[in-house]
Amino acid sequence: DTEVTQTPKHLVMGMTNKKSLKCEQHMGHRAMYWYKQKAKKPPELMFVYSYEKLSINESVPSRFSPECPNSSLLNLHLHALQPEDSALYLCASCSLGQAYNEQFFGPGTRLTVL
Amino acid sequence: DQQVKQNSPSLSVQEGRISILNCDYTNSMFDYFLWYKKYPAEGPTFLISISSIKDKNEDGRFTVFLNKSAKHLSLHIVPSQPGDSAVYFCAASSTSYGKLTFGQGTILTVHP
């Protein structure tokens, strides 16, 4: 299995809702990432988990809450989002056994905040 | 401060010809460089990479060239095919910091 899966593909939520994005990989990768991508822009790193521990938080607002329940799963909990948070949210994973940061991306969740 | 720059927002090429996508970087700590391809509504797909100890890496139709002194890399696609039409992102990494820094992307259109 050489893919990263993400659910749901699309999500529409109101500003008072609580929702979660899910990401799964079965490649044995021990680093997992959340990115946010706005239209016509490159992916922006949000969080990095290494060995199921949060290692990088790129000053992301607390309305985004990541969770790594095990080495295959990564969640992103959303609460009280703003319309400007509407974007494509990408999950990626990488093997920590190699020296370099060759990340494999999932298809993304298209989030719309009303 | 944009540490990785792709100065051409778009490139149009005829099928069968060479596509050359360029990327410049400013951070001397970067020691690994990657190219990703992205179709609309999909995640980026890894294409090819190069370590800073090399100046060329080839994989089928794709070749990446690195000029460390100029802090410049390029992706050559030969021959170009209509299915290559996508957004291409250059990314750079440092082994001391587990993070990819992406360029702004170049939209490649290959005409039949």
Image (cartoon, coloured by chain):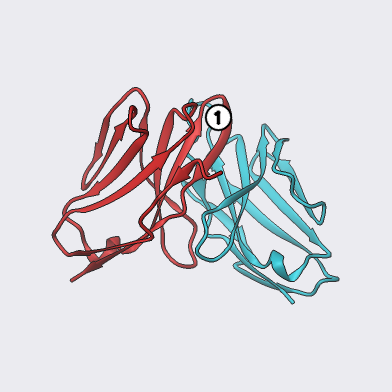
Chain colours: A cyan, B red
Residue at 55%, 29% in the rendered image = A96
Q: Looking at the image, is B77 positioned above or below residue B25?
A: below
Res B85 visible: yes
Q: Mark 1 lies on which chain?
A: A
Residue under label 1: A96
Q: Which residue is drawn at 60% across and 34% down?
A: A30
* Residue drawn at (33%, 39%) of the image: B73
Q: What residue type is labelled 1?
A: Leu
Q: In this view, does B91 lie above or below B54?
A: below
Q: Is residue A28 visible to us here?
A: no
Asked whether B56 or A90 is in front, the reply is: B56
Give how far across and how far down residue B10 sits, in percent: 34, 62
Extreme residue in the left direction = B16
| Residue B4 coordinates in the image, percent (x, y) | 46, 43
Identified at 53% across, 40% down, the residue is B100
Camera-side residue of B77 and A69: B77
Where on the picture, by quarter, is residue A49? top right
Q: Nearer the viewer, residue B39 or B109?
A: B109
Q: Nearer the viewer, residue B78 or B92?
A: B92
- Mark 1 neighbour density, 10 Å: few (under 14) some (14–19) many (20 or more): some
